[in-house]
Amino acid sequence: MNKTQRRALFTLSISILLIAFGVIIFNSMFTLGDRTAGVKLVKVWMWLILAASIGGAFFVHFKRKTSKVEKDERDSHIKKNAVLVSFISLWILLFIAGIIPSFIAGDTGSIPVTLLPIINMGVFLIALLVYSVAVLIQYGWKIKGEKS
């Protein structure tokens, strides 16, 4: 597994954790009752994300052999295609993010301004997720003839 694949796995795992964390936070924002009802769960998720980030950083930056080539033309081509797919998905997601609030609030309704950064962060995390999945799909899920 080369460095690009390790970075894509790291980004994929962190993106999934952050999206799940965002869903939990979003859900707790709109549940009835005490505002501190989900604080323990949020603290657990924060420690889980912190541990995954630190562990993943070591996983990504750990070099096994110094004699290996870091990247070649295939890696550049895979990254270029993944960026293209992510860019297209970004525009689709931004279009959807602009349409959905009008369906929820209606034409004359309004949404809180504090939701806009949450919407943008969700779009960003999903675009990162798409990039990581595109990289991993292009490399293939299995190691093909590589020696670790």
Image (cartoon, helix red, strand yellow):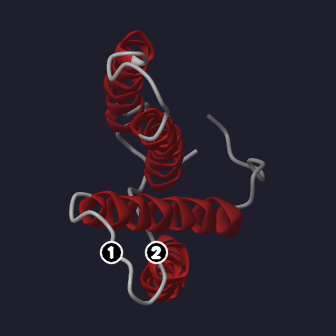
> Which residue is label 1 attached to?
110
Q: Local crowd at mark 2 within 10 Å, few (<14), some, or many (≥20)? A: few
Q: CA distance from mark 1 to mark 2?
A: 6 Å
Foreground residue, 72 or 25?
Answer: 25
Q: Local crowd at mark 1 within 10 Å, few (<14), some, or many (≥20)? A: few
Which amino acid lies under the numbered mark 2 shown in the image of this protein?
Answer: Ala
Look at the picture and state if 3 lies above or below 113.
Answer: above
Which residue is found at the position 55% from the left and 81% from the top? 103
Q: Residue 126: percent from the left, percent from the top?
A: 49, 62
Q: How many marks?
A: 2
Is residue 80 visible from the viewing direction of this image? Answer: no
Which amino acid lies under the numbered mark 1 shown in the image of this protein?
Answer: Ser
Foreground residue, 12 or 145?
Answer: 12
Q: Which element type, helix, strand or loop, lies under badge 1? A: loop
Which residue is found at the position 78% from the left and 48% from the top? 142
Q: Is residue 44 left or right of residue 135?
A: left
Q: Residue 27: percent from the left, percent from the top?
A: 50, 39
Q: Which image quarter: residue 110?
A: bottom left
Q: Residue 148: percent from the left, percent from the top?
A: 61, 34
- The circle drawn on residue 142 is none
Q: Is residue 46 left or right of residue 132?
A: left
Q: Quadrant of the N terminus?
A: top right
- The circle drawn on residue 105 is 2
Is residue 20 visible from the viewing direction of this image? Answer: yes
Look at the picture and state if 147 lies above or below 46.
Answer: below
Q: Is residue 90 left or right of residue 1?
A: left
Q: Which element type, helix, strand or loop, lies under badge 2? A: helix
Asked if the residue under mark 2 is in contact with the one under mark 1, i.e. CB atoms within 8 Å, the reply is yes
Q: Residue 121: percent from the left, percent from the top?
A: 33, 59
Q: Which image quarter: residue 35?
A: top left
Foreground residue, 66 or 103?
Answer: 103
